[in-house]
Image (cartoon, helix red, strand yellow):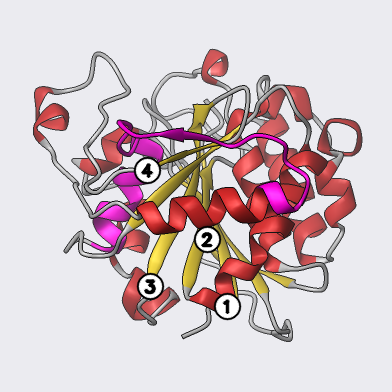
Protein backbone atom coordinates (compact mmCIF):
# COMPACT_ATOMS: atom_id res chain seq x y z
CA UNK A 1 0.00 0.00 0.00
CA UNK A 2 1.37 3.39 -0.99
CA UNK A 3 2.01 5.97 1.72
CA UNK A 4 0.73 9.48 0.96
CA UNK A 5 2.05 11.33 4.01
CA UNK A 6 5.35 12.19 5.63
CA UNK A 7 5.89 13.31 9.21
CA UNK A 8 8.18 15.55 11.19
CA UNK A 9 8.33 14.72 14.89
CA UNK A 10 9.96 16.70 17.67
CA UNK A 11 11.26 13.86 19.81
CA UNK A 12 11.91 15.97 22.91
CA UNK A 13 13.99 14.83 25.88
CA UNK A 14 15.02 11.17 26.27
CA UNK A 15 13.21 11.32 29.63
CA UNK A 16 9.95 10.93 27.76
CA UNK A 17 10.78 7.21 27.70
CA UNK A 18 10.17 6.94 31.46
CA UNK A 19 8.18 10.09 32.36
CA UNK A 20 4.46 9.49 31.88
CA UNK A 21 3.59 13.14 32.57
CA UNK A 22 5.10 14.48 29.34
CA UNK A 23 2.27 15.35 26.90
CA UNK A 24 4.26 14.20 23.88
CA UNK A 25 4.38 10.68 25.25
CA UNK A 26 0.58 10.45 25.23
CA UNK A 27 0.50 11.75 21.67
CA UNK A 28 2.91 9.09 20.51
CA UNK A 29 0.98 6.39 22.35
CA UNK A 30 -2.17 7.38 20.45
CA UNK A 31 -0.32 7.46 17.12
CA UNK A 32 -1.94 4.46 15.44
CA UNK A 33 -5.39 5.30 16.74
CA UNK A 34 -5.53 9.04 16.07
CA UNK A 35 -2.77 10.04 13.65
CA UNK A 36 -1.64 7.29 11.28
CA UNK A 37 -3.66 4.08 11.23
CA UNK A 38 -2.12 2.27 8.26
CA UNK A 39 0.69 -0.21 8.72
CA UNK A 40 3.72 0.72 6.58
CA UNK A 41 5.92 -1.85 4.91
CA UNK A 42 8.93 -0.25 6.63
CA UNK A 43 9.97 3.02 8.25
CA UNK A 44 12.73 5.34 7.10
CA UNK A 45 13.62 7.71 9.93
CA UNK A 46 15.95 10.69 9.73
CA UNK A 47 17.21 11.71 13.17
CA UNK A 48 19.08 14.84 14.19
CA UNK A 49 21.33 12.63 16.32
CA UNK A 50 23.11 10.98 13.40
CA UNK A 51 25.29 13.58 11.70
CA UNK A 52 27.82 12.48 9.08
CA UNK A 53 29.93 14.16 6.42
CA UNK A 54 28.18 12.17 3.67
CA UNK A 55 24.69 10.60 3.75
CA UNK A 56 24.73 7.22 5.47
CA UNK A 57 22.21 4.43 6.05
CA UNK A 58 22.33 1.68 8.63
CA UNK A 59 22.35 -1.71 6.94
CA UNK A 60 21.52 -4.21 9.68
CA UNK A 61 19.24 -7.20 10.17
CA UNK A 62 18.30 -6.19 13.71
CA UNK A 63 18.47 -2.70 15.18
CA UNK A 64 20.26 -2.29 18.49
CA UNK A 65 19.32 0.39 21.04
CA UNK A 66 21.87 3.22 21.21
CA UNK A 67 22.07 5.09 24.53
CA UNK A 68 23.46 8.35 23.14
CA UNK A 69 22.85 10.37 26.31
CA UNK A 70 24.63 10.72 29.63
CA UNK A 71 23.73 11.30 33.27
CA UNK A 72 20.13 10.10 33.04
CA UNK A 73 18.36 7.75 35.50
CA UNK A 74 19.51 4.12 35.41
CA UNK A 75 16.10 3.02 34.15
CA UNK A 76 16.83 4.74 30.84
CA UNK A 77 19.74 2.41 30.13
CA UNK A 78 17.65 -0.71 30.73
CA UNK A 79 15.13 0.09 28.01
CA UNK A 80 15.34 -1.90 24.80
CA UNK A 81 13.79 -1.21 21.42
CA UNK A 82 15.09 -3.59 18.78
CA UNK A 83 12.90 -3.66 15.66
CA UNK A 84 14.09 -5.52 12.56
CA UNK A 85 16.49 -3.66 10.34
CA UNK A 86 15.60 -2.93 6.73
CA UNK A 87 18.72 -3.72 4.68
CA UNK A 88 16.80 -3.84 1.41
CA UNK A 89 15.31 -0.42 2.12
CA UNK A 90 18.78 0.89 3.00
CA UNK A 91 20.07 -0.25 -0.40
CA UNK A 92 17.04 1.36 -2.05
CA UNK A 93 17.66 4.66 -0.22
CA UNK A 94 21.23 4.62 -1.44
CA UNK A 95 20.04 3.90 -4.97
CA UNK A 96 17.51 6.74 -5.18
CA UNK A 97 19.85 9.27 -3.59
CA UNK A 98 22.71 8.50 -5.93
CA UNK A 99 20.36 8.52 -8.91
CA UNK A 100 19.35 12.05 -7.86
CA UNK A 101 22.88 13.43 -7.80
CA UNK A 102 24.17 12.52 -4.33
CA UNK A 103 27.61 11.25 -5.21
CA UNK A 104 28.20 9.13 -2.15
CA UNK A 105 26.03 7.27 0.35
CA UNK A 106 27.82 5.25 3.01
CA UNK A 107 26.59 1.98 4.52
CA UNK A 108 26.96 1.48 8.26
CA UNK A 109 26.63 -2.22 9.01
CA UNK A 110 26.82 -1.91 12.81
CA UNK A 111 24.76 1.11 13.83
CA UNK A 112 21.38 0.68 15.52
CA UNK A 113 18.85 3.39 16.41
CA UNK A 114 19.73 6.53 18.40
CA UNK A 115 17.25 7.98 20.89
CA UNK A 116 15.87 10.39 18.30
CA UNK A 117 14.53 7.29 16.57
CA UNK A 118 13.81 4.69 19.23
CA UNK A 119 12.23 6.86 21.92
CA UNK A 120 9.25 8.00 19.80
CA UNK A 121 9.02 4.70 17.91
CA UNK A 122 8.77 2.64 21.09
CA UNK A 123 5.45 4.36 21.78
CA UNK A 124 4.27 4.65 18.20
CA UNK A 125 4.98 0.99 17.36
CA UNK A 126 5.60 -0.75 20.70
CA UNK A 127 5.57 -4.25 19.19
CA UNK A 128 8.82 -3.36 17.37
CA UNK A 129 7.77 -5.55 14.45
CA UNK A 130 8.08 -3.03 11.59
CA UNK A 131 11.50 -2.88 9.87
CA UNK A 132 13.32 0.41 10.44
CA UNK A 133 16.15 2.04 8.51
CA UNK A 134 17.88 5.22 9.66
CA UNK A 135 19.38 7.90 7.41
CA UNK A 136 21.86 10.52 8.60
CA UNK A 137 21.86 14.29 8.16
CA UNK A 138 24.77 16.56 7.19
CA UNK A 139 24.89 19.59 9.47
CA UNK A 140 27.52 21.31 7.32
CA UNK A 141 24.97 21.55 4.48
CA UNK A 142 21.87 23.77 4.32
CA UNK A 143 18.11 23.40 4.36
CA UNK A 144 17.77 23.25 0.58
CA UNK A 145 20.24 20.34 0.45
CA UNK A 146 18.08 18.37 2.89
CA UNK A 147 14.88 19.39 1.12
CA UNK A 148 16.33 17.97 -2.09
CA UNK A 149 17.32 14.84 -0.20
CA UNK A 150 13.66 14.45 0.75
CA UNK A 151 12.55 15.00 -2.85
CA UNK A 152 14.86 12.19 -3.92
CA UNK A 153 13.31 9.89 -1.32
CA UNK A 154 9.71 10.68 -2.27
CA UNK A 155 9.28 7.67 -4.62
CA UNK A 156 9.75 5.36 -1.64
CA UNK A 157 6.28 6.31 -0.44
CA UNK A 158 4.81 4.48 -3.43
CA UNK A 159 6.63 1.39 -2.16
CA UNK A 160 4.90 1.54 1.23
CA UNK A 161 7.67 3.32 3.13
CA UNK A 162 6.74 5.73 5.93
CA UNK A 163 9.25 8.61 5.98
CA UNK A 164 9.72 10.33 9.35
CA UNK A 165 11.97 13.23 10.27
CA UNK A 166 12.80 13.32 13.98
CA UNK A 167 14.34 16.47 15.43
CA UNK A 168 13.01 19.50 17.28
CA UNK A 169 11.15 22.68 16.40
CA UNK A 170 13.47 24.60 18.73
CA UNK A 171 16.67 23.24 20.25
CA UNK A 172 19.05 25.35 22.32
CA UNK A 173 20.61 23.38 25.16
CA UNK A 174 22.59 26.44 26.32
CA UNK A 175 19.42 28.36 27.13
CA UNK A 176 18.25 26.10 29.96
CA UNK A 177 15.95 27.82 32.44
CA UNK A 178 14.80 26.68 35.90
CA UNK A 179 11.87 24.32 36.15
CA UNK A 180 8.57 26.16 35.98
CA UNK A 181 9.85 28.96 33.75
CA UNK A 182 7.58 30.17 30.97
CA UNK A 183 8.46 29.60 27.34
CA UNK A 184 10.93 32.32 26.26
CA UNK A 185 9.72 34.93 23.73
CA UNK A 186 12.36 33.98 21.15
CA UNK A 187 11.07 30.38 21.13
CA UNK A 188 7.43 31.46 20.88
CA UNK A 189 8.18 33.81 17.98
CA UNK A 190 10.21 31.22 16.07
CA UNK A 191 7.55 28.60 16.68
CA UNK A 192 4.79 30.91 15.43
CA UNK A 193 6.78 31.81 12.32
CA UNK A 194 7.42 28.17 11.50
CA UNK A 195 3.78 27.20 11.94
CA UNK A 196 2.65 29.98 9.61
CA UNK A 197 5.35 29.22 7.03
CA UNK A 198 4.48 25.52 6.88
CA UNK A 199 0.71 25.94 6.86
CA UNK A 200 0.99 28.61 4.15
CA UNK A 201 3.27 26.42 2.04
CA UNK A 202 6.24 28.81 2.22
CA UNK A 203 8.73 25.96 1.99
CA UNK A 204 11.45 28.08 0.41
CA UNK A 205 11.34 30.33 3.46
CA UNK A 206 11.72 27.29 5.70
CA UNK A 207 14.69 26.13 3.61
CA UNK A 208 16.26 29.56 4.15
CA UNK A 209 15.21 29.78 7.79
CA UNK A 210 18.46 31.29 9.07
CA UNK A 211 17.69 34.37 6.94
CA UNK A 212 13.88 34.40 7.02
CA UNK A 213 12.94 33.30 10.55
CA UNK A 214 13.05 35.44 13.72
CA UNK A 215 15.60 34.31 16.31
CA UNK A 216 16.70 31.42 14.08
CA UNK A 217 20.19 31.27 15.54
CA UNK A 218 18.78 31.25 19.06
CA UNK A 219 16.25 28.56 18.20
CA UNK A 220 18.89 26.48 16.43
CA UNK A 221 22.50 27.39 17.24
CA UNK A 222 23.28 24.22 15.29
CA UNK A 223 20.90 23.02 12.57
CA UNK A 224 21.11 19.27 13.19
CA UNK A 225 17.70 19.01 14.90
CA UNK A 226 15.96 21.09 12.23
CA UNK A 227 17.17 19.39 9.07
CA UNK A 228 14.97 16.28 9.56
CA UNK A 229 12.04 18.66 8.94
CA UNK A 230 13.49 19.64 5.57
CA UNK A 231 13.83 16.00 4.55
CA UNK A 232 10.23 15.23 5.51
CA UNK A 233 9.11 18.42 3.78
CA UNK A 234 10.87 17.52 0.54
CA UNK A 235 9.59 13.94 0.63
CA UNK A 236 6.02 15.18 1.01
CA UNK A 237 6.11 16.78 -2.42
CA UNK A 238 6.25 20.29 -3.84
CA UNK A 239 2.47 20.83 -3.71
CA UNK A 240 1.91 19.14 -0.36
CA UNK A 241 -0.12 20.80 2.36
CA UNK A 242 1.18 20.86 5.91
CA UNK A 243 -0.97 19.87 8.86
CA UNK A 244 -0.26 20.46 12.53
CA UNK A 245 -1.16 17.30 14.43
CA UNK A 246 0.01 18.15 17.95
CA UNK A 247 1.63 21.00 19.87
CA UNK A 248 3.21 20.95 23.33
CA UNK A 249 6.27 22.33 25.08
CA UNK A 250 8.82 20.45 27.15
CA UNK A 251 12.47 20.37 28.09
CA UNK A 252 14.74 18.39 30.39
CA UNK A 253 14.01 20.55 33.44
CA UNK A 254 10.52 21.67 32.63
CA UNK A 255 7.99 18.99 31.75
CA UNK A 256 5.48 21.29 30.09
CA UNK A 257 5.00 25.01 30.31
CA UNK A 258 2.05 25.08 28.00
CA UNK A 259 0.05 22.77 25.84
CA UNK A 260 -2.47 23.53 23.16
CA UNK A 261 -3.89 20.63 21.22
CA UNK A 262 -4.35 21.73 17.63
CA UNK A 263 -5.47 19.98 14.50
CA UNK A 264 -5.64 22.02 11.34
CA UNK A 265 -8.57 20.39 9.57
CA UNK A 266 -9.44 22.92 6.89
CA UNK A 267 -6.47 22.21 4.62
CA UNK A 268 -7.13 20.09 1.56
CA UNK A 269 -5.09 16.91 1.31
CA UNK A 270 -3.32 16.61 -2.02
CA UNK A 271 -1.51 13.56 -3.34
CA UNK A 272 1.00 14.00 -0.56
CA UNK A 273 0.86 15.76 2.76
CA UNK A 274 3.44 16.91 5.25
CA UNK A 275 2.29 16.36 8.82
CA UNK A 276 4.28 17.91 11.56
CA UNK A 277 4.15 17.26 15.24
CA UNK A 278 5.60 19.84 17.56
CA UNK A 279 6.86 19.08 21.03
CA UNK A 280 8.98 22.19 21.35
CA UNK A 281 12.18 22.00 23.33
CA UNK A 282 13.57 25.53 23.67
CA UNK A 283 16.30 24.44 26.03
- Cα separation, mark 1 vs mark 2, equals 11 Å
Q: Is residue 148 visible?
A: yes
Q: Nearer the viewer, mark 4 or mark 1?
A: 4
The mark found on residue 158 in the picture is 1
Horizontal relation, residue 143 to residue 10: left or right: right
* Disc number placed over residue 59 in the picture, else none: 4
Answer whether labels 4 and 1 touch (C-beta < 8 Å). no
Q: How many marks?
A: 4
**Distance CA(mark 3)–CA(mark 1):** 11 Å
Work out whether mark 3 precedes mark 4 in sequence or the reverse, and give the earlier one. Answer: 3
What residue range appears in magenta?
A: 98-125
| Left or right: 76, with 273 as reference point | left
Provide residue 121's location: percent of width, then percent of height: 32, 54
**Residue 66 appears at what percent x and percent y?**
27, 30
Q: Residues within 10 Å of mark 3 (few under 14, many from 20)?
A: some
The residue carrying mark 3 is 41
Amino acid sequence: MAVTETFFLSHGSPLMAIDESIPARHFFQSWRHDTYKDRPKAILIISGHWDTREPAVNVVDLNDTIYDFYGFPDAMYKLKYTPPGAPELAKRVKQVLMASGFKRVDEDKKRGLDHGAWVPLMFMYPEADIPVCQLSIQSDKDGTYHYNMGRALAPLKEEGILIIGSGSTTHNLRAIKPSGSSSPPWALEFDSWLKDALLQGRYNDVNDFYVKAPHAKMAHPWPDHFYPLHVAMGAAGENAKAKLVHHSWSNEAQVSSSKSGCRVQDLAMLSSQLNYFKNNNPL
